[in-house]
């Protein structure tokens, strides 16, 4: 059995029997993606189950030349699992924001495991429910905030994802504006204000959070 160490301790994998684990690896392929490479192109056929073993990616929807980032995902995450069984085409794009290792699993084999293994099936349903709930909660949460609160919410979440108060913004100012639902000018004005107040230091795409407590207060109350 090859390439198992990367996933052998993950909860979804340990729910499978040894024979099922072997079958998953026999019918999957590991692909490497460089930073900024496209992992999934919106509209492509969803004939594989994609699992992000290592790295980080952004998920976005494009509509009339507008790109909205709706989620950032990191290690040990299925990509688009919540829509893999209802559509034959991906309705979003996934772009690597760090070097990524992605496992492509044959969809029919994955479905076979769901039919054969009740514990695994329940786990998959729970994962899809958690992903959907998080996305909906985040989007609703942002829609009820002013521009300062929305931008600060995104920055605190990014710090949590990157596990650091210093990181490179994984999307452009325009994408950030589309994500929080405000104009590019409003977002830039917010970032400038945060920098003047010494809450953050912004240089190009590099963001350094200088005062996390104040940032969190604005995110909560904005």
Image (cartoon, rainbow, N blue to C red):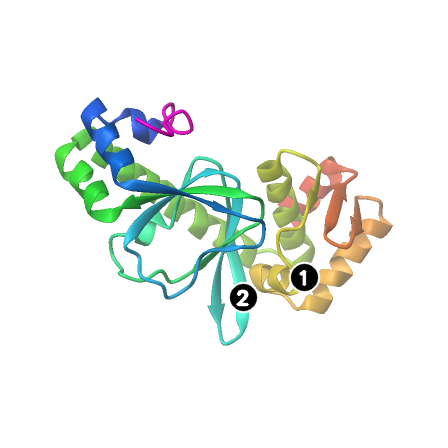
Residue at the disc numbered 1: 173
Figure check: 104 above or below 193: above
Q: Main secondary structure of the magenta part?
A: loop
Q: Quadrant of residue 23?
A: top left
User: N-terminal of the two: label 2 or label 1?
Assistant: 2
Q: Position of residue 68 (x, y in %)?
A: 53, 62
Figure check: 76 above or below 33: above
| Whole-number angstrom distance, CA of label 2 to CA of label 1 | 11 Å
**Label 1 element class:** helix
Magenta residues (range): 1-10
Mark 1 closeness class: few <14, some 14–19, many ≥20 residues within 10 Å: some
**Residue sitting at x 48%, y 68%:** 62
Instruction: Give the residue at the far bottom of this rendering.
Output: 64
Q: Is residue 136 found left or right of 165 in the rendered image? A: left
Residue at the disc numbered 2: 67
**Residue sitting at x 73%, y 68%:** 185
Figure check: 112 above or below 117: below
Q: Quadrant of the N terminus?
A: top left
Q: Position of residue 151 (x, y in %)?
A: 66, 53
Query: Residue 143 magenta-drawn?
Result: no
Q: Nearer the viewer, residue 10 or 153?
A: 10
Q: Is residue 77 found left or right of 48 in the rendered image? A: right
Q: Quadrant of residue 160?
A: top right
Q: Are marks 2 and 1 in contact (CB under 8 Å)?
A: no
**Residue sitting at x 31%, y 54%:** 83
**Label 2 element class:** strand
């Amino acid at each position: 059995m090859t390439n198992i160490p990367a996933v052998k301790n993950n909860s979804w994998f340990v729910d499978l029997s040894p024979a099922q684990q072997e079958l998953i690896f026999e019918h999957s392929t590991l692909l490497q993606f460089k930073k900024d490479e496209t992992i999934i192109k919106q509209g492509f056929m969803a004939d594989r189950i994609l699992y992000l073993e290592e790295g980080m990616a952004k998920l976005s929807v494009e509509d009339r030349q507008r790109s909205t980032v709706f989620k950032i995902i990191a290690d040990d995450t299925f990509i688009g699992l919540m829509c893999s069984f209802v559509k034959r085409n991906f309705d979003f794009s996934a772009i690597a924001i760090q070097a990524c290792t992605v496992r492509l699993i044959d969809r029919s084999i994955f479905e076979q495991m769901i039919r054969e293994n009740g514990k695994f099936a329940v786990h998959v349903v729970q994962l899809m429910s958690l992903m959907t709930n998080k996305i909906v909660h985040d989007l609703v949460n942002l829609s009820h905030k002013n521009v300062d609160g929305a931008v600060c919410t995104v920055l605190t979440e990014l710090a949590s994802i990157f596990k650091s108060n210093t990181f490179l913004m994984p999307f452009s100012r325009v994408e950030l504006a589309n994500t929080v639902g405000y104009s590019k000018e409003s977002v830039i004005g917010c970032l400038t204000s945060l920098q003047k107040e010494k809450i953050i230091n912004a240089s190009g795409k590099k963001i350094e959070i200088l005062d996390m407590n104040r940032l969190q207060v604005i995110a909560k109350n904005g």
